[in-house]
Amino acid sequence: MIVIQTNRKYTFAFGERKLVINKLSHESEFQPFAKALVFALFHKQYRSLRLEPQLPEERFQPDLCAFDFDGSTMLFWSEVGNVSLAKIEKLFKKYRKAHFVFVKEEQDVPAFDKHLHKLSKDMLSLPLIDIVVYPPHFQEWNVSPEGDVFIRKEDVQIIRWHQPKGHKEHF
């Protein structure tokens, strides 16, 4: 039996704003829905939030990110699913003032937490780090058949893994 996997497009709506997410054939269904979740939770806080932008000067590419008003300072960087510790370490050093958000399924959080502790023990400073626990029924309960996304931060478990002293939220 031959199984042919194809790319698929998902369209999500956040009020008047629409977002088209391409799911590549090698990606799971988790990927586009986790990206939509991050966008739903943070697009009002980070008005310049963009999905999978191409950062020409950057070796690593985010799933979502946001810059300040003049595009000079990274404010927000999000990764959904698997991400290497080497990538995380380099990003933490390069973007010390950014807010990092990692989306993990509940069963993956303890291992990721352990890896972050191991990685961070030798670092002098850390940026703001949150782990969003992907809601088990997000796809069925919080996304309409038309792609409208309905979820609030209060409805999601967000683990504030690290908050630097003197950190100010960007609203």
Image: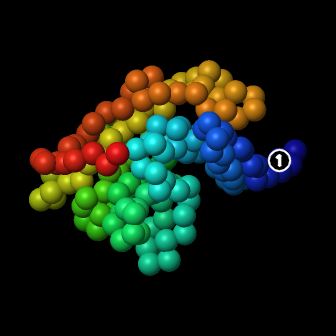
In the rendered image, residue 79, in percent from the top left (x then y), is placed at 45, 51
Q: Give amino acid for label 1.
A: Val
Colour scheme of this structure image?
Answer: rainbow
Q: Is residue 33 above or below residue 24?
A: above
Between residue 132 and residue 117, name the one nearer to us.
132
Which quarter of the picture shows residue 142? top right
Q: Residue at x 62, y 36 (%)?
A: 15
From the top left corner, tell me how far across and down residue 87 is, in percent: 37, 62
Element on which disc 1 rests? loop
Residue under label 1: 3
Image quarter of the C terminus: top left
Q: Residue at x 50, y 77 (%)?
A: 56
For label 1, count other residues whose C-alpha is less than 10 Å away and answer few (under 14), some (14-19) or many (20+).
Answer: few
> Left or right: where does residue 50 sit relative to residue 71?
right
State whether residue 83 appears in this view.
Answer: no
Does 6 appear above or below 93? above
Q: Residue at coordinates 79% horizontally, 52% vertically from top-left?
A: 6
Location of residue 22 in the rendering, given as x and y in whole percent from the top left corner: 69, 53
